[in-house]
Protein backbone atom coordinates (compact mmCIF):
# COMPACT_ATOMS: atom_id res chain seq x y z
CA UNK A 1 0.00 0.00 0.00
CA UNK A 2 1.35 3.42 -0.92
CA UNK A 3 0.88 6.59 1.19
CA UNK A 4 -1.64 7.92 -1.32
CA UNK A 5 -3.82 4.80 -0.99
CA UNK A 6 -4.27 4.91 2.77
CA UNK A 7 -7.38 7.03 3.24
CA UNK A 8 -9.59 3.97 3.72
CA UNK A 9 -7.09 2.40 6.10
CA UNK A 10 -6.75 5.72 7.92
CA UNK A 11 -10.44 5.94 8.62
CA UNK A 12 -10.72 2.25 9.42
CA UNK A 13 -8.10 2.25 12.16
CA UNK A 14 -9.13 5.52 13.80
CA UNK A 15 -11.77 5.74 16.50
CA UNK A 16 -14.37 7.10 14.11
CA UNK A 17 -17.55 5.66 12.60
CA UNK A 18 -19.09 6.62 9.29
CA UNK A 19 -22.67 7.63 10.04
CA UNK A 20 -25.45 5.62 8.46
CA UNK A 21 -26.46 7.05 5.14
CA UNK A 22 -23.03 8.48 4.33
CA UNK A 23 -21.97 12.06 3.87
CA UNK A 24 -25.33 13.22 2.54
CA UNK A 25 -27.13 12.04 5.67
CA UNK A 26 -24.52 13.70 7.85
CA UNK A 27 -24.92 16.90 5.88
CA UNK A 28 -28.62 16.87 6.70
CA UNK A 29 -27.69 16.71 10.36
CA UNK A 30 -25.23 19.57 9.94
CA UNK A 31 -22.25 17.33 10.78
CA UNK A 32 -19.85 16.69 7.88
CA UNK A 33 -17.42 13.78 7.73
CA UNK A 34 -17.01 11.17 10.44
CA UNK A 35 -18.55 10.94 13.89
CA UNK A 36 -16.28 10.40 16.86
CA UNK A 37 -16.88 7.86 19.56
CA UNK A 38 -15.37 10.20 22.13
CA UNK A 39 -14.79 13.91 22.39
CA UNK A 40 -11.10 14.17 21.73
CA UNK A 41 -8.37 13.53 19.23
CA UNK A 42 -5.04 12.14 20.39
CA UNK A 43 -2.34 14.21 18.74
CA UNK A 44 1.38 14.78 19.14
CA UNK A 45 3.82 17.55 18.35
CA UNK A 46 7.30 16.27 17.55
CA UNK A 47 9.85 19.06 17.43
CA UNK A 48 13.62 19.12 17.35
CA UNK A 49 13.92 22.31 19.37
CA UNK A 50 12.56 23.67 22.66
CA UNK A 51 14.72 26.68 23.50
CA UNK A 52 14.42 30.39 22.79
CA UNK A 53 11.47 32.76 22.69
CA UNK A 54 10.67 32.15 18.99
CA UNK A 55 10.52 28.40 19.56
CA UNK A 56 8.53 28.85 22.76
CA UNK A 57 5.92 30.78 20.80
CA UNK A 58 5.57 27.93 18.29
CA UNK A 59 5.40 25.14 20.88
CA UNK A 60 3.22 26.88 23.47
CA UNK A 61 0.72 28.13 20.92
CA UNK A 62 0.32 24.59 19.61
CA UNK A 63 -0.38 23.34 23.13
CA UNK A 64 -2.80 26.20 23.86
CA UNK A 65 -4.82 25.45 20.75
CA UNK A 66 -4.88 21.69 21.39
CA UNK A 67 -6.08 22.23 24.95
CA UNK A 68 -8.72 24.73 23.82
CA UNK A 69 -10.05 22.14 21.37
CA UNK A 70 -10.05 19.42 24.01
CA UNK A 71 -7.44 17.26 22.31
CA UNK A 72 -5.31 14.71 24.12
CA UNK A 73 -2.07 16.56 23.38
CA UNK A 74 1.46 15.18 23.72
CA UNK A 75 4.81 16.94 23.21
CA UNK A 76 7.88 15.02 22.01
CA UNK A 77 11.27 16.77 21.88
CA UNK A 78 14.39 15.36 20.29
CA UNK A 79 17.31 17.34 21.63
CA UNK A 80 18.54 17.63 18.05
CA UNK A 81 18.65 13.91 17.25
CA UNK A 82 16.95 12.48 14.17
CA UNK A 83 16.95 8.96 15.61
CA UNK A 84 15.09 10.15 18.71
CA UNK A 85 12.50 11.87 16.51
CA UNK A 86 12.10 8.73 14.40
CA UNK A 87 11.59 6.67 17.57
CA UNK A 88 9.02 9.16 18.89
CA UNK A 89 6.99 9.03 15.68
CA UNK A 90 6.96 5.25 15.78
CA UNK A 91 5.78 5.41 19.38
CA UNK A 92 2.86 7.65 18.38
CA UNK A 93 1.93 5.26 15.58
CA UNK A 94 2.10 2.26 17.92
CA UNK A 95 -0.11 4.08 20.43
CA UNK A 96 -2.73 4.73 17.75
CA UNK A 97 -2.47 8.53 17.67
CA UNK A 98 -5.01 10.26 15.44
CA UNK A 99 -2.38 12.51 13.90
CA UNK A 100 1.06 14.08 14.22
CA UNK A 101 2.37 17.63 13.79
CA UNK A 102 6.05 17.46 12.96
CA UNK A 103 8.91 19.97 12.98
CA UNK A 104 11.73 17.83 11.57
CA UNK A 105 15.33 17.94 12.72
CA UNK A 106 16.44 16.67 9.30
CA UNK A 107 14.05 16.83 6.34
CA UNK A 108 15.64 13.90 4.52
CA UNK A 109 16.28 11.61 7.48
CA UNK A 110 12.69 11.85 8.73
CA UNK A 111 11.07 11.03 5.37
CA UNK A 112 10.93 7.25 5.70
CA UNK A 113 9.26 7.24 9.12
CA UNK A 114 6.68 9.77 7.90
CA UNK A 115 5.90 7.27 5.15
CA UNK A 116 5.61 4.52 7.78
CA UNK A 117 3.14 6.61 9.76
CA UNK A 118 1.05 7.35 6.69
CA UNK A 119 1.01 3.69 5.69
CA UNK A 120 -0.23 2.90 9.20
CA UNK A 121 -3.04 5.45 8.85
CA UNK A 122 -1.60 8.21 11.05
CA UNK A 123 -1.59 11.50 9.07
CA UNK A 124 1.45 13.76 9.43
CA UNK A 125 1.35 17.54 8.98
CA UNK A 126 4.63 19.46 9.08
CA UNK A 127 5.14 22.99 10.39
CA UNK A 128 7.99 25.50 9.92
CA UNK A 129 10.38 22.86 8.50
CA UNK A 130 9.22 20.40 5.86
CA UNK A 131 9.86 16.68 5.40
CA UNK A 132 11.13 15.50 2.01
CA UNK A 133 8.36 13.05 1.15
CA UNK A 134 4.97 13.11 -0.55
CA UNK A 135 3.56 11.25 2.46
CA UNK A 136 3.13 14.56 4.31
CA UNK A 137 -0.50 15.65 4.16
CA UNK A 138 0.38 19.35 4.23
CA UNK A 139 3.20 21.67 5.25
CA UNK A 140 2.46 24.98 7.02
CA UNK A 141 4.98 27.82 6.94
CA UNK A 142 5.75 31.13 5.25
CA UNK A 143 7.91 31.75 2.17
CA UNK A 144 11.48 32.65 3.10
CA UNK A 145 12.08 33.72 -0.49
CA UNK A 146 9.13 36.13 -0.58
CA UNK A 147 9.97 37.53 2.86
CA UNK A 148 13.62 38.03 1.92
CA UNK A 149 12.72 39.95 -1.22
CA UNK A 150 10.40 42.20 0.75
CA UNK A 151 13.06 42.83 3.41
CA UNK A 152 15.51 43.84 0.69
CA UNK A 153 12.92 46.14 -0.87
CA UNK A 154 12.31 47.77 2.52
CA UNK A 155 16.04 48.42 2.82
CA UNK A 156 16.23 50.06 -0.60
CA UNK A 157 13.12 52.14 0.06
CA UNK A 158 14.47 53.39 3.39
CA UNK A 159 17.88 54.20 1.97
CA UNK A 160 16.36 56.38 -0.73
CA UNK A 161 13.88 58.00 1.63
CA UNK A 162 16.27 58.72 4.47
CA UNK A 163 19.35 59.63 2.44
CA UNK A 164 17.84 61.50 -0.54
CA UNK A 165 20.98 63.57 -1.19
CA UNK A 166 23.09 60.51 -2.05
CA UNK A 167 23.38 59.16 -5.58
CA UNK A 168 24.38 55.67 -4.43
CA UNK A 169 24.39 53.49 -1.32
CA UNK A 170 26.53 50.72 0.15
CA UNK A 171 25.04 47.76 2.00
CA UNK A 172 26.50 45.08 4.25
CA UNK A 173 24.80 41.68 4.36
CA UNK A 174 24.88 39.56 7.54
CA UNK A 175 23.91 36.12 6.27
CA UNK A 176 23.50 32.62 7.64
CA UNK A 177 26.14 29.94 7.05
CA UNK A 178 25.85 28.35 3.59
CA UNK A 179 24.75 24.75 3.41
CA UNK A 180 21.13 24.69 4.48
CA UNK A 181 18.28 25.58 2.15
CA UNK A 182 17.00 28.26 4.52
CA UNK A 183 20.36 30.04 4.36
CA UNK A 184 20.17 30.11 0.57
CA UNK A 185 16.57 31.35 0.55
CA UNK A 186 17.49 34.17 2.93
CA UNK A 187 20.48 35.18 0.81
CA UNK A 188 19.87 34.78 -2.92
CA UNK A 189 16.62 36.78 -3.14
CA UNK A 190 18.29 39.63 -1.25
CA UNK A 191 21.19 39.70 -3.69
CA UNK A 192 18.77 39.55 -6.62
CA UNK A 193 16.87 42.62 -5.44
CA UNK A 194 20.09 44.62 -5.11
CA UNK A 195 21.19 43.52 -8.57
CA UNK A 196 17.94 44.94 -9.93
CA UNK A 197 18.78 48.41 -8.58
CA UNK A 198 21.15 50.98 -10.11
CA UNK A 199 22.02 52.85 -6.93
CA UNK A 200 22.51 50.20 -4.22
CA UNK A 201 25.74 48.21 -4.05
CA UNK A 202 26.37 45.08 -1.99
CA UNK A 203 29.67 46.22 -0.48
CA UNK A 204 30.28 43.08 1.58
CA UNK A 205 28.89 39.93 3.17
CA UNK A 206 29.72 38.44 6.56
CA UNK A 207 28.53 35.12 8.00
CA UNK A 208 26.85 35.55 11.37
CA UNK A 209 26.16 31.87 12.22
CA UNK A 210 22.55 32.77 13.19
CA UNK A 211 23.75 34.16 16.55
CA UNK A 212 24.24 37.61 18.04
CA UNK A 213 27.82 37.30 19.28
CA UNK A 214 29.28 36.03 16.00
CA UNK A 215 27.43 38.66 13.97
CA UNK A 216 28.70 41.40 16.27
CA UNK A 217 32.31 40.26 15.91
CA UNK A 218 32.15 39.82 12.12
CA UNK A 219 30.49 43.21 11.56
CA UNK A 220 33.08 44.96 13.70
CA UNK A 221 35.88 43.28 11.75
CA UNK A 222 34.34 44.22 8.42
CA UNK A 223 33.73 47.86 9.36
CA UNK A 224 37.28 48.20 10.70
CA UNK A 225 38.66 46.89 7.41
CA UNK A 226 36.31 48.94 5.23
CA UNK A 227 33.95 51.71 6.30
CA UNK A 228 30.52 52.17 7.85
CA UNK A 229 27.92 51.11 5.26
CA UNK A 230 24.77 53.05 4.49
CA UNK A 231 22.63 50.03 5.26
CA UNK A 232 22.71 46.55 6.82
CA UNK A 233 20.54 43.55 6.00
CA UNK A 234 20.42 40.60 8.42
CA UNK A 235 18.95 37.16 7.79
CA UNK A 236 17.49 36.82 11.30
CA UNK A 237 16.83 38.96 14.35
CA UNK A 238 19.74 37.70 16.44
CA UNK A 239 22.29 38.58 13.77
CA UNK A 240 20.63 41.97 13.32
CA UNK A 241 20.88 42.71 17.04
CA UNK A 242 24.53 41.68 16.90
CA UNK A 243 25.18 44.01 13.98
CA UNK A 244 23.43 46.87 15.78
CA UNK A 245 25.49 46.23 18.92
CA UNK A 246 28.69 46.32 16.87
CA UNK A 247 27.80 49.64 15.27
CA UNK A 248 26.79 51.14 18.61
CA UNK A 249 30.05 50.13 20.29
CA UNK A 250 31.95 51.68 17.37
CA UNK A 251 29.88 54.87 17.68
CA UNK A 252 28.88 54.27 14.06
CA UNK A 253 25.12 54.67 14.07
CA UNK A 254 22.39 57.05 15.21
CA UNK A 255 18.59 57.08 15.40
CA UNK A 256 16.50 57.36 12.27
CA UNK A 257 16.42 60.91 10.93
CA UNK A 258 19.96 61.77 11.99
CA UNK A 259 22.86 62.07 9.53
CA UNK A 260 24.82 59.09 10.87
CA UNK A 261 21.87 56.71 10.86
CA UNK A 262 22.64 53.31 9.32
CA UNK A 263 19.49 51.89 7.71
CA UNK A 264 18.80 48.37 8.99
CA UNK A 265 16.21 45.78 7.96
CA UNK A 266 15.96 42.12 8.87
CA UNK A 267 14.01 38.90 8.72
CA UNK A 268 12.03 37.98 11.86
CA UNK A 269 10.94 40.19 14.70
CA UNK A 270 11.49 39.88 18.45
CA UNK A 271 10.83 41.89 21.59
CA UNK A 272 14.28 43.50 21.39
CA UNK A 273 13.82 44.17 17.68
CA UNK A 274 10.54 45.95 18.30
CA UNK A 275 12.15 48.18 20.91
CA UNK A 276 15.02 49.01 18.54
CA UNK A 277 12.49 49.91 15.84
CA UNK A 278 10.66 52.19 18.25
CA UNK A 279 14.00 53.77 19.20
CA UNK A 280 14.74 54.46 15.53
CA UNK A 281 17.78 52.17 15.38
CA UNK A 282 16.27 49.44 13.20
CA UNK A 283 14.02 50.51 10.35
CA UNK A 284 11.94 47.44 9.66
CA UNK A 285 11.51 43.69 9.88
CA UNK A 286 9.53 41.06 8.02
CA UNK A 287 8.13 38.58 10.51
CA UNK A 288 6.46 35.17 10.59
CA UNK A 289 3.01 34.33 11.98
CA UNK A 290 4.81 31.58 13.89
CA UNK A 291 2.28 31.12 16.68
CA UNK A 292 -0.29 30.15 14.03
CA UNK A 293 1.80 27.33 12.51
CA UNK A 294 0.95 24.60 15.01
CA UNK A 295 -2.71 25.58 15.45
CA UNK A 296 -3.22 25.70 11.68
CA UNK A 297 -1.61 22.27 11.34
CA UNK A 298 -3.92 20.89 14.03
CA UNK A 299 -6.98 22.53 12.51
CA UNK A 300 -6.25 20.97 9.12
CA UNK A 301 -5.41 17.65 10.80
CA UNK A 302 -8.78 17.65 12.56
CA UNK A 303 -10.57 18.47 9.35
CA UNK A 304 -8.69 15.71 7.52
CA UNK A 305 -9.55 13.09 10.13
CA UNK A 306 -13.22 14.05 10.14
CA UNK A 307 -13.75 14.61 6.42
CA UNK A 308 -10.92 12.93 4.56
CA UNK A 309 -8.52 14.06 1.85
CA UNK A 310 -11.17 16.12 0.06
CA UNK A 311 -11.30 18.51 3.01
CA UNK A 312 -7.78 19.81 2.35
CA UNK A 313 -7.35 22.84 0.06
CA UNK A 314 -6.57 22.44 -3.62
CA UNK A 315 -3.07 23.21 -4.89
CA UNK A 316 -3.25 26.62 -6.52
CA UNK A 317 -6.05 27.87 -4.28
CA UNK A 318 -6.07 30.74 -1.79
CA UNK A 319 -7.21 30.18 1.80
CA UNK A 320 -8.47 33.00 4.00
CA UNK A 321 -9.51 33.35 7.62
CA UNK A 322 -13.12 32.79 8.64
CA UNK A 323 -15.06 33.18 11.84
CA UNK A 324 -15.27 36.96 11.98
CA UNK A 325 -11.61 37.59 12.64
CA UNK A 326 -10.02 40.80 11.39
CA UNK A 327 -6.77 41.64 9.69
CA UNK A 328 -4.15 43.77 11.51
CA UNK A 329 -5.46 46.78 9.55
CA UNK A 330 -8.90 46.24 11.01
CA UNK A 331 -10.54 45.04 7.80
CA UNK A 332 -13.22 42.42 8.58
CA UNK A 333 -12.75 39.02 6.96
CA UNK A 334 -14.72 35.82 6.77
CA UNK A 335 -18.10 35.05 8.30
CA UNK A 336 -19.85 36.29 11.46
CA UNK A 337 -18.57 35.23 14.85
CA UNK A 338 -19.88 32.01 16.31
CA UNK A 339 -19.04 29.86 13.30
CA UNK A 340 -17.04 26.66 13.81
CA UNK A 341 -13.27 26.83 14.04
CA UNK A 342 -13.10 25.37 10.55
CA UNK A 343 -15.64 25.99 7.80
CA UNK A 344 -16.09 24.62 4.31
CA UNK A 345 -17.96 25.67 1.20
CA UNK A 346 -19.78 22.93 -0.72
CA UNK A 347 -18.55 22.49 -4.28
CA UNK A 348 -20.86 21.97 -7.23
CA UNK A 349 -19.50 18.48 -7.83
CA UNK A 350 -20.54 17.28 -4.40
CA UNK A 351 -17.05 17.51 -2.94
CA UNK A 352 -15.74 20.04 -0.47
CA UNK A 353 -13.84 23.17 -1.36
CA UNK A 354 -11.56 24.17 1.52
CA UNK A 355 -11.43 27.92 1.09
CA UNK A 356 -11.58 29.22 4.65
CA UNK A 357 -10.24 28.20 8.02
CA UNK A 358 -9.75 30.01 11.29
CA UNK A 359 -8.24 29.66 14.71
CA UNK A 360 -10.69 30.68 17.40
CA UNK A 361 -9.26 33.51 19.55
CA UNK A 362 -8.70 32.65 23.21
CA UNK A 363 -7.14 34.23 26.27
CA UNK A 364 -3.54 33.12 26.70
CA UNK A 365 -0.46 34.89 28.06
CA UNK A 366 -2.56 37.89 28.99
CA UNK A 367 -3.76 38.62 25.45
CA UNK A 368 -6.57 37.55 23.16
CA UNK A 369 -4.32 35.18 21.22
CA UNK A 370 -5.06 34.62 17.52
CA UNK A 371 -7.39 37.61 17.44
CA UNK A 372 -5.67 38.93 14.32
CA UNK A 373 -5.34 36.35 11.51
CA UNK A 374 -1.94 37.63 10.42
CA UNK A 375 -1.35 34.41 8.47
CA UNK A 376 -4.16 35.22 6.01
CA UNK A 377 -4.36 34.95 3.07
CA UNK A 378 -2.36 31.80 2.43
CA UNK A 379 -1.48 30.39 -0.98
CA UNK A 380 -1.52 26.63 -1.45
CA UNK A 381 1.44 25.40 -3.44
CA UNK A 382 3.27 22.11 -3.81
CA UNK A 383 6.72 20.75 -2.94
CA UNK A 384 8.04 17.23 -2.34
CA UNK A 385 4.80 16.04 -3.92
CA UNK A 386 2.54 17.42 -1.18
CA UNK A 387 0.63 20.59 -0.35
CA UNK A 388 2.41 23.66 0.93
CA UNK A 389 0.21 26.05 2.93
CA UNK A 390 2.19 29.28 2.49
CA UNK A 391 1.10 31.97 4.92
CA UNK A 392 1.38 35.71 4.56
CA UNK A 393 4.12 37.61 6.39
CA UNK A 394 3.96 40.65 8.68
CA UNK A 395 5.89 43.86 8.06
CA UNK A 396 7.05 45.59 11.24
CA UNK A 397 7.79 49.32 11.26
CA UNK A 398 7.59 52.09 13.85
CA UNK A 399 3.84 52.31 13.16
CA UNK A 400 3.05 48.81 14.48
CA UNK A 401 6.08 47.76 16.56
CA UNK A 402 3.93 47.78 19.71
CA UNK A 403 1.06 45.80 18.16
CA UNK A 404 -0.29 43.01 20.38
CA UNK A 405 -0.46 40.57 17.45
CA UNK A 406 3.34 40.36 17.06
CA UNK A 407 4.78 37.22 18.64
CA UNK A 408 7.66 39.17 20.23
CA UNK A 409 5.19 41.32 22.14
CA UNK A 410 3.54 38.19 23.56
CA UNK A 411 6.59 36.04 24.23
CA UNK A 412 9.40 38.19 25.61
CA UNK A 413 13.13 37.48 25.22
CA UNK A 414 13.18 35.33 28.37
CA UNK A 415 10.22 33.17 27.37
CA UNK A 416 10.83 29.45 27.83
CA UNK A 417 8.78 26.31 27.50
CA UNK A 418 7.31 25.19 30.79
CA UNK A 419 8.29 21.57 31.12
Image (cartoon, helix red, strand yellow):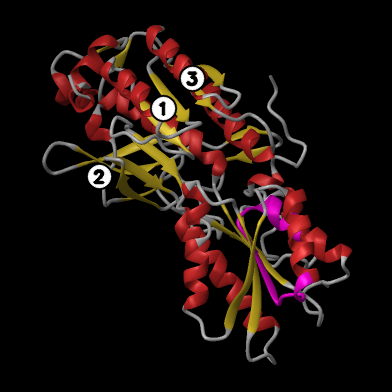
Q: Residue at x 68, y 73 (%)?
A: 231
- Measured as percent of width and height from the top left, residue 381 is found at 31, 49
Task: Find the magenta span and give its range.
Answer: 225-243
- Measured as percent of width and height from the top left, residue 206 is found at 66, 61
Q: Residue at x 53, y 16 (%)?
A: 74
Q: Which residue is mark 1?
A: 110
Q: Judge whether residue 239 is colored magenta.
A: yes
Q: Which residue is mark 2?
A: 314
Q: Does the residue at mark 3 contact the one at mark 2 (Cβ under 8 Å)?
A: no
- Measured as percent of width and height from the top left, residue 402 is found at 72, 55
User: Image quarter for residue 355?
Assistant: top left
User: Image quarter for residue 155?
Assistant: bottom right
**Earlier residue among tags 3 and 2:** 3
Q: Nearer the viewer, residue 67 or 228?
A: 228
Looking at the rendered structure, the secondary structure element under dot 2 is loop
Residue 370 showing in the rendered view: no
Q: Which residue is mark 3?
A: 83
State how many labels appear: 3
Q: Does the residue at mark 1 contact the one at mark 3 (Cβ under 8 Å)?
A: no
Quarter of the image with the C terminus is top right
Label 1: few (<14), some (14–19) or many (≥20) C-alpha neighbours in 10 Å: many
**Earlier residue among tags 1 and 3:** 3
Amino acid sequence: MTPKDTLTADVGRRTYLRALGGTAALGALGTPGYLRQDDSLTVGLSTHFTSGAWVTAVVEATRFYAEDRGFDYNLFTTGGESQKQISDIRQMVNQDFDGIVLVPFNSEAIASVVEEATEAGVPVFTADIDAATDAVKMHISWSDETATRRTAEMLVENLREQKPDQDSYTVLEVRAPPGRDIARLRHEPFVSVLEETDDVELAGTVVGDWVRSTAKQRVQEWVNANEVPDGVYSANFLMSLGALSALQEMDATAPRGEDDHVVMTQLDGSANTHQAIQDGLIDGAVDQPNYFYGPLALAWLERYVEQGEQALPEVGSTVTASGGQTTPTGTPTGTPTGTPATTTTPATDGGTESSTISIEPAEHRGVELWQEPIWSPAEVGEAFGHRQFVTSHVEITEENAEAPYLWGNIWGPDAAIDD
